[in-house]
Image (cartoon, grey):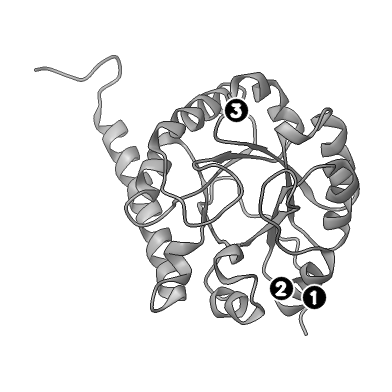
Amino acid sequence: MTGPSRTVPDPTDLIVAPSLLAVDFAVSAARDVAEVADWLHVDIMDGRFVPNRTIGLDHFAVLRAATSIPLDTHLMIEDPEVWAPRYAEAGSTYVTFHAEACPDPVALAKDIRAAGARPGLAIDRDTPVEPYLELLPHIDMLLIMTIKAGAGGQAFLPHLLEKVRTARAHRDAGDLHVRIEVDGGIAEDTIGQAVQAGADTFVAGTAVFTASDPATAVRRLRELAVATRAGARAAADAVPPGGEGER
């Protein structure tokens, strides 16, 4: 049995986090991708904040004991003030709670950090990001949903990437070390769009676990993300200072 890992990657790394929601949180599936995935994404739903219900702390503990890979825990629940520190203590590397469910995100972020994890703030499909930009100095990750929170397998909504662009511009202007994660519909044909918008962390469930080889699917998503970012940087470097050059 392996113990928990709290390793946090360099802020410039591109992270692919397979979502275990797509495989009903099977330990065997977690092990299948543990050697190639950067993190595992664990969706906790309570049937109240969102209609569906998933696992609780007991099954989370089984997952934690089964692999040393960092666990990225996404709480889609009411009362995150009660539960978020418990998931931190149980071995999460990141614990992300929803802005819509928490009246005092700064206080909860402090509690999560005190319990041993890094705090994240999630913004659902219909929630504007602008009111929460001032909270970026207090969190370690901003999760922007590119679907409606609460169910896997939904289609990617590209217009929600405008929130990513807004958050990335604010982060860069303030020189803040905050990861920007996207969750919902991430696949080979969408991950590049998310990279171009400014995201650096990508949750993928269906695209990974419906593939014939989930480990290969994870590698492919990371390759596409890296290639997209490299291409964007090369294009930016090709533009002369002060304009687009002669026409």
Which residue is under mark 2? 68
Question: Picture coordinates of residue 146 (x, y %)?
Answer: 49, 41
SS at mark 1 in the image: loop
Report whether 28 appears left or right of 102. left
Q: How many marks?
A: 3
Q: Secondary structure at mark 2?
A: loop
Above-or-below relation of 46 to 181: below
How packed mark 1 is, by other alpha carbons closer than 10 Å (few <14, some 14-19, many 20 or more), is few
The residue that label 1 is drawn on is 3
Tag 1: amino acid = Gly
Name the spot of residue 196 as percent of width and height, x first.
38, 38
Please report whichever mark, 1 or 3, sits nearer to the chain's N-terminal start.
Answer: 1
- The picture places residue 190, in percent across and down from the top left corner, at 36, 48
Q: Residues within 10 Å of mark 3 (few under 14, many from 20)?
A: some
Residue sticking out furthest to the bottom: 1
Q: Residue at x 80, y 63 (%)?
A: 56
Q: Earlier in the sequence, mark 2 or mark 1?
A: 1
- Cβ–Cβ under 8 Å for marks 2 and 1: yes
Label 2, residues with CA under 10 Å away: few <14, some 14-19, many ≥20: many
Q: Quadrant of residue 145?
A: top right
Residue at image location 88% in from the left, 58% down from the top? 89
Instruction: Say which residue appears at 32% left-offset and 39% top-offset.
Output: 232
Rendered residue at 50%/49% (across/down): 184
Q: Which of the numbered marks, if any, corresponds to residue 165?
A: none
**Label 3 sits on what residue type?**
Thr
User: Mark 3 sits on what residue?
Assistant: 127
Q: Secondary structure at mark 3?
A: loop
